[in-house]
Amino acid sequence: MQAPAPVSDSLHHTSPFLLNCGSDGVNLSRTVKPCSAGDRPGISVNCNLGWSSQTSPDLSQHFRGYSSASEAVLTAQSDLRKLLVGNEKIGVLLLNLGGPETLDDVQPFLFNLFADPDIIRLPRLFRFLQKPLAKFISVVRAPKSKEGYASIGGGSPLRQITDAQAEALREALCGKDVPAKVYVGMRYWHPFTEEAIEQIKRDGITKLVVLPLYPQFSISTSGSSLRLLESIFREDEYLVNMQHTVIPSWYQREGYIKSMATLIENELTKFPVPQKVMIFFSAHGVPLAYVEEAGDPYKAEMEECVDLIMEELEKRGITNPCTLAYQSRVGPVEWLKPYTDETIIELGQKGVKSLLAVPISFVSEHIETLEEIDVEYKELALESGIKHWGRVPALGCEPTFISDLADAVIESLPYVGAMAVSNLEARQSSDGTSVKWKPKLSLPVFPSY
């Protein structure tokens, strides 16, 4: 038995790559690495949230004179978006982990978490023990977990924040001439992914963009949610035939990178000597075997993400040193290193006096940021000789971030398609290494970068 995995609550692209989800795992296989998506100007309009019954516009009527080149570009973009939408009912499904909203929710939430074979990976022969083991672990861990949730107000704020992000995304899409309904599907607590899918069917959605709220892809986060989604789609004729696409990760997007850099830049100004602050990126960890044996691209994507953020900061004249470590490990097996707690102690021993924590894998506040980082790691830092501590807030509904997510959705619309059967064996992962999974179905995936 392997240790539990993380416990946490363009139109200019060439060709898409496939995300293959099968009974043995999830595999990314890129056919072409497209260029990065740049910012695209939005258009502020009053948007009717009802579905349009008008036919797609005839572009020929818009070939006329414009007062400026920018006006022509904006009009062309708007027309193209209207063509992409047409009479379709567009839906966006945001995927997230979920979290207990009350202390009474903690134990059943933990059961749902550990009953997921992507979290505790048992050999096939022992998979009948998955639920009994999940029950045991959830009961044992519930008291300590309740203490953590009690310290941050008695429950996770993740649902409230995700709902706010969904509404902000809907408004941003509306402002870009793409009326859409945005749904929230949680993996381990309400509203469950299954609940969101039922609402999508009731609303008659005809084009769906699936957007995990994890910037970097991992088997245990986006992978688990997408595999569940695939199993739901496979058993439902309406869903199999519904046009849809997946944005598996989006850590390279310019809007996301700039938003993270801005948050860091703002927090640095709060230190006595901003230039001497160590920027400390803390990401949620995964067992090392996920990366080395199963081909999880999480570590590579995380390291590239940090590099891109630091490059953006350098463009702004910020050249602070930085480091990356991984938090929230559990169990006896080795997880991705370096570990956050050990790294904090080492930095204190090396004489670092100012530390700015950056929760790099989280776009919402939850127990890992509000309790683990803000309380546990802050105390450890002060005990280790670090005098000045700060923490960058999670992105939440930061406007540039939300606008960029809306752009990602719009850019993905040309890539929607129905689920296709594939008999292919294991493909290559995003870094070219062999993956030991046997995908059975292929979901159309939008190349978000």
Image (cartoon, grey):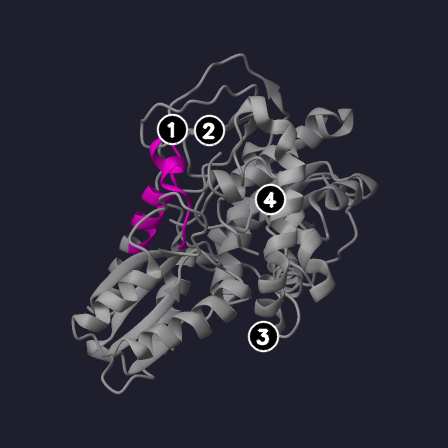
Q: Which residue is drawn at 45% across and 74% down?
A: 375
Question: Label 4 near label 1: C-beta < 8 Å?
Answer: no
Q: Which residue is drawn at 64% across and 46% down?
A: 136
Instruction: Identify which amino acid the numbered label 3 is placed on.
Output: Ser
- Magenta stretch, residue numbers: 284-306
The CA span between labels 1 and 2 is: 6 Å
Q: Tell me, yes or no, whether the highlighted magenta stretch contains residue 285.
A: yes
Q: Give the CA distance from mark 1 to mark 4.
A: 26 Å
Q: Distance between the residues labelled 2 and 3?
A: 38 Å
Q: Which mark is residue 151?
A: 3
Of discs 1 and 4, which sits in the foreground? 4
- Pointer 2 or 4: first along the chain: 2
Residue sitting at 63 percent across and 58 percent down? 142
Left/right of residue 192 with respect to residue 334 in the rendered view: right
Q: Could you say which disc has been placed on residue 137 in the image?
A: none
Q: Residue furthest left?
A: 350
Residue type of the residue flagged with mark 1? Ser
Q: In this view, does 142 lie above or below 28?
A: below
**Residue 27's disc number:** 2
Q: Which mark is residue 114?
A: 4
SS category of the residue bearing label 4: helix
Residue 429, label in figure: 1
Q: Is residue 308 visible?
A: yes
Residue 332 forms part of the magenta stretch: no
- Farthest residue to the bottom: give it: 272
Comes first in the chain, label 1 or label 4:
4
- Bin the neighbour count of mark 4 within 10 Å (Cα to Cα): few under 14, some 14-19, many 20 and up: many
Q: Decide: marks 1, 2 in contact (CB < 8 A)?
A: yes
The secondary structure type at the circle numbered 2 is: strand
Q: In which quarter of the image is residue 231?
A: top right
What's the residue type where badge 4 is placed? Phe
Mark 1 or 3, which is nearer the eye? 3
